[in-house]
Image (cartoon, rainbow, N blue to C red):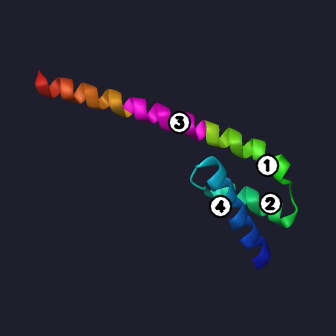
Amino acid sequence: MQLNLYVAIIGIMLIYLHTGFRPSKYMFAMMSMVATGGATLGDIMPILRERERRCALDRESQRKRNAKKRAEKMKQQTS
């Protein structure tokens, strides 16, 4: 069991180095499945990529909303 943990951690760190995305609990759970033989890396990589793509879209959307709110707040303060 401990070996599975180390395999999952090493896998997550390698993915982080490759993608630049911060590791998540979801990524750890998926890599644990690979380490225990429940899935292959080829099976989970498309899932992880799609999840990271959606997270990136959410971050960008949140950044735009925050910028819009700041602009409205500044506009109200100057009025």
Which residue was labeled with disc 4?
Answer: 13
The image shows residue 64, relative to residue 24, as above or below, that is: above
The image shows residue 38, relative to residue 46, as above or below, that is: below
Do labels 2 and 1 touch, CB within 8 Å?
Answer: yes
Which residue was labeled with disc 3?
Answer: 58
Disc 2 from disc 3: Cα separation: 26 Å
Residue at 80% x, 60% y is 33
What type is the residue that disc 3 sits on? Answer: Asp
Q: Dot 3: what SS?
A: helix
Do labels 4 and 2 touch, CB within 8 Å?
Answer: no
Q: Where is residue 38 in the image (x, y as percent from the top left)?
A: 87, 59
Quadrant containing the C terminus in the rendered view: top left
What type is the residue that disc 2 sits on? Answer: Met
Q: Is the magenta stretch mostly helix, strand or loop?
A: helix
Quadrant containing the N terminus in the rendered view: bottom right
Q: Dot 1: what SS?
A: helix
| For marks 1 and 3 on the same chain, the one whose residue lies earlier in the sequence | 1
Disc 1 from disc 3: Cα separation: 21 Å
Which residue was labeled with disc 2?
Answer: 33
